[in-house]
Image (cartoon, coloured by chain):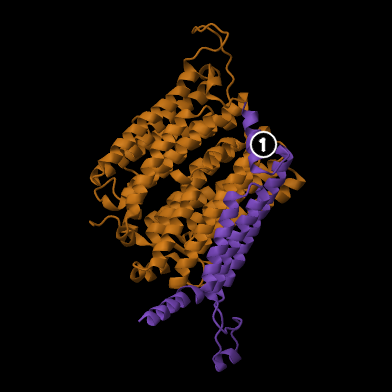
Chain colours: A purple, B orange
Amino acid sequence: MEERKQIEMMECLFTKILAKYNYWISVILMLIGLYAIIAKDNLIKKIIGLNIFQTAIFLFFISLGAIKGGTAPIVSEEIVSKGYVYVNPLPHVLILTAIVVAVATAAVAFSLIIRINEEYGTIEESEIFEKLKESEK
Amino acid sequence: MSYFIEHFPVLIVVISLLSSITILVAGWINNKTSYFIFITTILIQFVAAIFILVHVLTGSPIHYWLGGWKPPWGIEYVVDALSAYVLVILLFLALACGIYSKKNIEHELPKKVVSFYSIFQLLIAGLCGVAVTGDVFNMYVFIEIMSIAAYALIASRGKIALKASFTYLVLGSVGACFFLIGIGLLYSVTGSLNMHDLSLLLPPLYGNRVVQAAFVFFFVGLSIKMALFPLHTWLPDAHAFAPAEISAMLSGIIIEVSTYAFIRVSFSVFTVNFLKLLPILDILCWVAGAAIIVGSLLAITQLNLKRMLAYSSVANMGYIMLAVGLSTSVVSEPWNGLTPALMHILNHALMKGCLFLVAGVFIYKADLWLIKDFQGLGKRMPYTCAAFVVAAISMIGIPPSVGFVSKLYIILAAIEAKKIIFVALLLLSSLLNLVYFWRVIETMYMKKVEGEEYSLLTHVSKDEAPFGMLAPVLILASLCIVMGFFWLAKIPMPLLNQVNSMFGLNKMP
């Protein structure tokens, strides 16, 4: 009885966690990114956190379209006749677009950080807040 | 003619994108041309949007397949009554802000005129794109185009605006990422991205936890974009320190277009049946109620006029979302379904557009930011202040202004939905509105100017804003009253009823 329970637990562990490891990795990466956005004081580190967060989502999309043993999605007669499977190309296309968006966001963010550095002389968030408070007085 | 109108949805976006680049190139050669190109483009877009609206009202929705690819494989642009309505509102306010920006930008950003108009046009491209698209991923891309343009425009004034823009950028990107996760989850269960196709594929999957999680991601992501109460923290600084016309666009249009995206996703993709399955709309009502009260209370504590208006925007997003939350349980005309919500989208655009432009005039003429410095303005700038008063009484909700009509309709909807507590909340918030707007009006008209004897005979020299800035302000202020009569006469109701019947909100539950 005990043994069977253990086997069931192992199976559960396998099907829930190990077999879907790609999703778990993207969730963990997402959380690392969010943590960096919230907790880091340095503005550049925040943006790096944001990039990790976005990359985790890209990973999620790509692993949605992936298939075990799938080839590149270039449909030729050979692939059709030999019955090869190929990965879903649509998530790749979506992610190419999303990467462009992410790069644009990062570019705007870094240029903002450069301007902030010129204006306040620092890129640490806490120091910027202190300077803002001083200027209010 | 009808053949041409079929192409207008895509033209509105493409013209805008092309014009953005043209402004930049023409600006290198001669920076006087940039404004001309900018305003001409918006005029063309506005006329096209009116043609689309008329076409949609008299005929059927416009479907445009990009590159001739049939949906669900290709990207489809769909313009129905709701999109056309939002399109006309956003281009109208963009036109008003465009006219206003001629003088203001020369004064505020003399060295950045060309790039300002170029990015402004990009912002309008993004906004139009969100309104016309019929594809969820395409919507994500356009939301990001509009947001990135907005980050850059907010930062254009430098100093505190840089920090405000950075905060908005981080939060806005996280919101957009949540939207993207929602798309991914929906795609993983249906294999489609087209909104109409999704609405056909989803009903058997409503019990599926992935679909429900997808909705939550859409909801949270768009709540950040539209600054719904607990997620509004980016809004006050961003609205307060942007140039005046960008503040007006942000408050009047950008957060409204995010609301439109939310309405589109929840009613077009998920449909009413899904919303009734889960207690989403009840939660939305309570969140919106909290937004109304907290936004109004925080507005009272502000010393800076533009920050006060920004917090008032938080409260007004609460009104719109409350109306959305009540929409499924209200069927009797004319306050049925989404009518009050859509009504307040237009009304808020008019009122807040006007108020922020007036605040911009004060900064342009005399660099006045704080409410306590406004003594004697009523005599110095009589027309501007009159416009402010009209828009302010409209916000408070004195009949027959637009604010009165939308509050009346939301209250009637709340009574019909048997949620009396929200009636109380709305009345309380009207009272709070009165408190913070009256404070400004009192300072403008009744407080003595320091070091000057107050009497009616005292000569205060008139120092009115230039005509180019005054005209849009006065037009918006007069529309605040005129639209009120239009609403009371129920002239735009066929349009809104078309939206309601499209989403199946007219039937008895």
Question: Which residue is found at the position 26% from the left and 44% from the top?
Answer: B419
* Percent position of residue B170, x then y: 58, 50
- In the image, B26 versus A32, the foreground residue is A32
Is residue A127 visible in the rendered image? The answer is yes
Question: Label 1 marks which chain's residue?
Answer: B
The image quarter containing residue B220 is bottom left
Quadrant of the image containing the C terminus of chain A: top right
Position of B38 compared to B376: left or right?
Answer: right
* Percent position of residue A59, x then y: 58, 68
Q: Mark 1 points at which residue?
A: B159
Position of B394 compared to B174: left or right?
Answer: left
* Percent position of residue B492, x then y: 36, 45
Residue furthest toward the bottom? A82
Amino acid type at circle 1 is Lys
- In the image, B167 versus B251, the foreground residue is B167
- In the image, B85 versus B225, the foreground residue is B225
The secondary element bearing badge 1 is classed as loop
Vertical placement of residue B450 versus A78, above or below: above
Position of B211 compared to B469: left or right?
Answer: left
* Percent position of residue B112, x then y: 70, 41
